[in-house]
Image (tube, coloured by chain):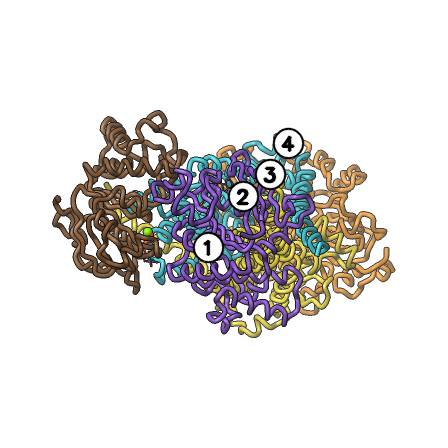
Chain colours: A purple, B brown, C orange, D yellow, E cyan
Amino acid sequence: MANTKFKIKDLDFYYGDFQALKNINMDIEEKVVTAFIGPSGCGKSTFIKTLNRMQDLVSYARVDGLISLDGQNIYEKGYDANLLRKKVGMVFQHPNPFPKSIYDNIAYGPRTHGIKDKTQLDQIVEESLRAAAIWDEVKDKLDKNATAISGGQQQRICIARAIANDPEVLLMDEPTSALDPISTGKIEELISELKEKYTVVIVTHNMQQAARISDKTAFFLTGEVIEFDDTEKIFSNPSDQRTDDYISGRFG
Amino acid sequence: MANTKFKIKDLDFYYGDFQALKNINMDIEEKVVTAFIGPSGCGKSTFIKTLNRMQDLVSYARVDGLISLDGQNIYEKGYDANLLRKKVGMVFQHPNPFPKSIYDNIAYGPRTHGIKDKTQLDQIVEESLRAAAIWDEVKDKLDKNATAISGGQQQRICIARAIANDPEVLLMDEPTSALDPISTGKIEELISELKEKYTVVIVTHNMQQAARISDKTAFFLTGEVIEFDDTEKIFSNPSDQRTDDYISGRFG
Amino acid sequence: QEGTINVVSREDGSGTRGAFVEIVGVVDENEDDMTTTSAAIQNSTNGVMQTVAGDPNAIGYISLGSLDDTVKSVTVDGAEATPEAINAGDYPIARPFVVAWGEDQSDVSADFLTFIHSQEGQTIVEEEGYIAVDASASAEGEESSEEASSEETTEESATEETTEEPAEGEESAGAEEAASEEETTEEETTEEEASSEETIEEESATEEESTEEESGSVVASLPSYEAAGLEGTVEVVGSTSVTPVMEVLAEEYMALNPDVTINITSNGSSAGIEAATGGAADLGMSSRELTEDEAAALNQANIALDGIAVVVHPESTVEDLSLETIRSIFLGEVTEWEEAAQ
Amino acid sequence: MQSNFTETFMKYVFIVCASLSILSIILIFYFIFEGGVPFILEEGIGNFIFNEVWRPTASNPSFGILPMIVGSLVVTAGAIIIGVPIGVLSSIFMAFYCPDWLYKFAKPAINLMASIPSIVYGYFALRLFVPFFRDLMGGTGMNIVTASTLLGIMILPTIIGLTEASLRAVPKEYYSASVGLGADHDRSIMRVILPAAKSGILSAIILGIGRAIGETMAVILVTGNQPAIPNDLNQGVRTLTTNIVLEMGYASGRHREALIATAVVLFIFIIILNTTFMIVKNKGGND
Amino acid sequence: MTKKISFIKILVWAAGLFTLGMLLFIVGYIFYNGLPHLSASMFEWDYTTDNVSMMPSIISTLIIIGASLLIAGPIGIFTGFYLVEYADQKSKFLPIIRLATDTLAAVPSIVYGLFGMLLFVYQFEWGYSHFAGILTVTIMILPIIISSTEEALRSVNDSLRMGSYGLGAGRLRTIFTVVLPVAMPGILSGVILAIGRIVGESAAFIYTLGSSSSMISSLGDSGRTLAVHMYMLSQEGLHVDESYAVASILILIVLFINGLSNLIGNRLGSGGK
Ligand SMILES: Nc1ncnc2c1ncn2[C@@H]1O[C@H](COP(=O)(O)OP(=O)(O)OP(=O)(O)O)[C@@H](O)[C@H]1O
Ligand SMILES: Nc1ncnc2c1ncn2[C@@H]1O[C@H](COP(=O)(O)OP(=O)(O)OP(=O)(O)O)[C@@H](O)[C@H]1O
Ligand SMILES: [Mg+2]
Ligand SMILES: [Mg+2]
């Protein structure tokens, strides 16, 4: 279908003694939406966070195996984690805009990476907000505190904030689970647009959501990838019984 | 099918100015499992909590309409809310055992209602734990802290705790949503047994769960009951389009 | 010695300061305290000592009883600050310790006062480094000597001259030692106590003994105390400065009268007088003169005299200052050590 | 089973207990003001507050506490200049940089710092800070800078305790979000966490100021206590609190009333501060 | 940018180490000056000018801590109950109580001292006494206990309350048997703070408790706490060494109390979670 963006080989992951991920092998393709599903605690969040090295922040976490982005091992010594995170943006389950103005939220990433010029920043802010389909709703209140808008809007601000960094990949960990159906609809729509430009990896609890928006789906169970295939195939004709059980709601 | 346990007539419910329930009419039958489904925020929890007057604790809440238990209006002046809650037990979404020993957790209700005798308490504790299908797992550690066991066990302790009060009705608000699949299975099994003795009302996010364990299902949407019927009917042939949309995962 | 003089004073209202400015003359025509406003203020003897001990250019004044070798006491017009010199009238800066009581004095309280004014009591006063007084003399209105400070040993003169310096004393370093020696000194008080003056420069010990005999300490002439076998409690409240000697007196008295309890609360002269006036205390301790109002409501008696030493840094080259120079320094007229030395 | 009577009875017991703190503050208010306000009125508010001469024992006494007001303000300002940066940086250290092994000691150490009696601080400063600043600045060494430094250190535990708490109360998500955008630890803390905690930090600073203004037994030893308005940093000052403690033991009559009146002024300062604190806290809550 | 990283890091470490260093320095200074002067005679039962025993002040300190906690403890905890469990969170009474406790917390100790003197010592004519001292510090520590109780109660998960109400337990039973045990470590840490405040206090005591050095025989007696004892010993410059020795003991006591509270906190904490 396309180039491989992330290549994951024999990945084991440990929180202290507890092994949260077991022998993961997966290729994530460029400009495609990949969904991770699975019951609570199966390691979806853990895995998505290894992709931009957010797990570096957990002092007792340990990674074994290989993750390469565009062919380069991101866990290699000397690889700049901050630059990685600029390239691989992240959106979290709960909208978490900074308690600053909307403008400052969006400009935070670019400023961090050295852009000081006001005109340039203005332009980035507008473009990102447009890309996140929220420009029209907030263009008149860019100096308003970003925590004072609705949850759905906040989440799109967070997506815009990630986009402002001009990333190549967007990781989203249950981005709609805290939102109402209408906001959810908007964000799902947005994701379908985003895949034109970005590689999107999304974790979701909602199987219908995965079915609706993703091209590829991985089913996780207790730290292992049980099945990874085209979304259509997974939902219509899974090859593993456990996948079938899960999808048809027999557990989880 | 059976006697009516709860009769709800023209129930409106307000949190301050916000109307969370609109004109609910429903008969809940004795010794039957009734499931409430619906998207987040539709008022399921609000409704279930009006049934044992837990909403009394929300100072700005207001109830309009009639709820009667065995023919008696529970919101009548002079009706003892504490006795009501003894009769109508409740199990919550997150297991919430008291940070006391398992024994003390189970004995809490009986002691509250005046049972002091040690032999009698011992007997109640054992019976309740057996009824909640957890006796074998904890019988050797009754003096252990109830918060030091697994989530699934904790939830069954909470069920046992409710049962120890010798209730007539058990209200359960998403009792398995915080649990792993295996624990969930055990609790679902337990519920099927419980309905022999108790009237069970259960809120769930998991439609398959509702389908598996309930006899009757009510579908809530923005504070209204859209459809209330036999579970089989709701899941195979709903009469309302919105019910159909929800069940087939088109929103929520 | 050169450099700016750093003047250290006590707080306004302090008895020590009142006595000092009065005797040295740091006052204006209205007898108002004119201590230079640039003086650093400390509210305790220790504060003054620590300040002076740490500052080569400082000068301050403290109770003679508290003097130790962390600071150096200068001679005033050639006279050394010792009890003997004060008794002999050579060292001019000294003030009285006063106790006051209300109308209905309890027997125990009266007996305790008798003890304080007895030979035994005044012996302790001397042992603690203060100067003994003769209560009977003052009762007759006589002044036993011409000493600069002795005018205050009588009640009458004290009440007459109410503009006189308020007086406040300091704790005595001799307390510990004196207390331990009390038992043995009961007989030969005069000799024994002389050697117990640890706060005074050592070489003066022998000299002291003779000086005392020469100057005729009043102690020998005082009546001896007989325990009356009373029982009860005496509440003594007031001056922090009087407290140390009062504590020793109380301990000794309680040893002689096992059924009597004496409680001492140390919280300032005014508080003591107020407590005595209000009846909360049997005896109020004051290191300042009573005001006219207070004196009208209370009886009072002096129980000791205390000297005030003028102190400088131990390494200071200043040895002697005239009373006039000290006055100029504290008035802020002389601000450089070079000037003061002249 | 709890009878309804017990329930209701205890409810009233709780209400009564809750009212006791209101009663206490009213009592304090009443007694301090009753002791001091008549004097202030007699003396004239302007004459008491704006008069520069404090000579309470003179034959023609003058009770002007302007020097003490200035003294309190100056010394407190100094304490803020010294204590706030160190305190806030220390809290950042405690919350985000301190290694675990060190934190285990550092946390109780800072608690300990809060319970060391002020007199201990005072003598410590008298022996070590005073000579240091005398050598540095000349004069007696008992001056504004010495007192400010001492107070700056004494308010550290107050500032650190509260600031650390409010830094820790900032949702972790902000930090994750910042790191997720490629910002490093330092930037995430300085640009995201610190601003997010600002109302808490402000509250901490205000409480610190309250502590500094109210401190007595330590400053008394190192400020020189001259009741005169300073015109140089190496001069001593007298604060409102020290004015009370210095002279209370000996004061009687109007002098004593003047000191209680000083406490009234001190009290009013505290109330002003506290109102500011409430406003800041409420603002913070609305954000 | 790399430069800036290290700059902030250095700044923050420097501030942290300065603070800790300062504390070590102070504590070290006191121990250095005080510990060598500790002697058995300083712990004799009765104070004399000879032994300057700190025993009476230790006893007084303990009595004052005990008595004021006995009064302020229940009042503070009950106030916390009212604030968290009973009061309508929108009621007008709440901000008033909060204003009162915040103000109480900010009142300088010297003002407490004068207040206690004016009310208890003179108005009530109790004289300088343990009564006066106890009541004064009781008011002083009340806000500490109230605010820590309030915080501790609020941090108790509501689901526990719901669990209890859901079983038909009333408010009182819920509070005393479910909420209070869980909140205990938090309340205790407030109590420890209060003890620290009492132990370190001097200004408020000098004007209420007085400074009698004799062993307490009734609560109507004047007395002195350790901090006041230390102050009194140092005042006249006669017992400076001993006063440092007392200061060392004070610090040891504070350390001991902090350690104890950690221990209790861990005990209760592990039981409660
Ligand atoms: N920081 C951590 N320290 C220790 N264990 C952790 C940590 N984070 C997660 N775990 C454990 O790792 C396992 C996987 O967790 P993870 O959060 O990846 O699950 P998940 O699939 O995202 O679940 P959910 O759907 O509930 O978000 C779980 O057992 C969890 O308890
Ligand atoms: N205590 C409360 N005060 C004010 N509004 C409330 C309160 N509890 C719930 N609500 C509001 O009432 C509505 C119904 O809430 P409820 O908790 O009953 O929904 P629910 O169906 O149980 O949702 P979920 O599936 O997320 O548990 C929501 O809009 C919610 O925001
Ligand atoms: Mg997750
Ligand atoms: Mg709910």
Foreground residue among C286 and D183: D183
Q: Which residue is mark 1?
A: A175
- Please tell me in which quadrant of the rendered image residue C246 appears: top right
**x and y percentages locating residue C152 in the rendered image:** 65, 54
| Of callouts 3 and 2, the N-terminal one | 2
Q: Is residue E15 above or below residue C199?
A: below
| Of callouts 1 and 3, the N-terminal one | 3
The residue mark sitting in front, 4 or 1, is 1
- From this viewpoint, is residue C25 visible? yes
Q: Is mark 4 within 8 Å of ligand 1?
A: no
Q: Which residue is mark 2?
A: A26
Q: Which residue is mark 4?
A: E39
Label 1 crowd (10 A; few <14 / some 14-19 / many >=20): many
Subunit ID for the residue under disc 3 = A
Real-space Cα separation, disc 3 to disc 2, in angstroms:
12 Å
Which type of secondary structure does the marked residue at label 2 adopt? strand
